[in-house]
Amino acid sequence: MFNFGGLGNMASLLTSAQQIPGKMQQLTEQLKKEHIYATTGGGAVQVTLNGIGQMRSIEIDPAARENSQLEDWIVEAVNTASGEAKQRYAEAVDKMAKEMNISIPGLDKILATLTGGPKLTEGA
């Protein structure tokens, strides 16, 4: 007799794989609507990015415009918000994969590389 028990799992995996592009598009659209804020220089600079890291706005306190640290504050605020956006994206992808019951070997390492941070852990 033939044992085709593994084919059901393969069909399920293929079905899940076909859903990934649509799910990623939904995820991207959802993250585009989120706002991530970072403030530096004691409130002198505030940047706003969306959840995929696109800058939406930058606000600079007029009193800080002549401050020699202004450029540093801008860079720091953008980098802080960008790091948060990357982390949110990585967590959302990880959650999506778990919800779809997709196990991608090394996904946590890939996402950690993306965020520049530690590997995501189970349940994160």
Image: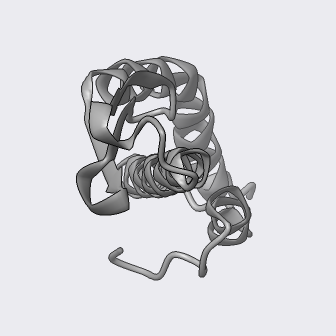
Q: Position of residue 107 (x, y in %)?
A: 66, 63
Q: 34 or 23: nearer the eye?
A: 34
Q: 46 or 109: nearer the eye?
A: 46
Q: 78 or 12: nearer the eye?
A: 78
What residue is rendered at 30% in x and 31% in y?
A: 62
Q: Position of residue 114 (x, y in %)?
A: 68, 56
* Colouring scheme applied when the structure was drawn: one colour
User: In the rendered image, which quarter contains the C terminus?
Assistant: bottom left
Q: Quadrant of residue 64?
A: top left
- Tell me if residue 106 comes above or below residue 50 in the rendering: below
User: Total marks drawn?
Assistant: 0
Q: Is residue 21 shown left or right of residue 33? A: right
User: Would you say residue 103 is visible in this rendering?
Assistant: yes
Q: Quadrant of residue 50?
A: top left
Q: Position of residue 43 (x, y in %)?
A: 25, 53
Q: Is residue 23 shown left or right of residue 60? A: right
User: Would you say residue 61 is visible in this rendering?
Assistant: no
- Tell me if residue 18 comes above or below residue 78 in the rendering: above
What residue is rendered at 59% in x and 48% in y?
A: 75
User: In the rendered image, which quarter contains the N terminus?
Assistant: bottom right
Q: Position of residue 92 (x, y in %)?
A: 39, 49
What residue is rendered at 37% in x and 55% in y?
A: 95
What residue is rendered at 67% in x and 67% in y?
A: 116
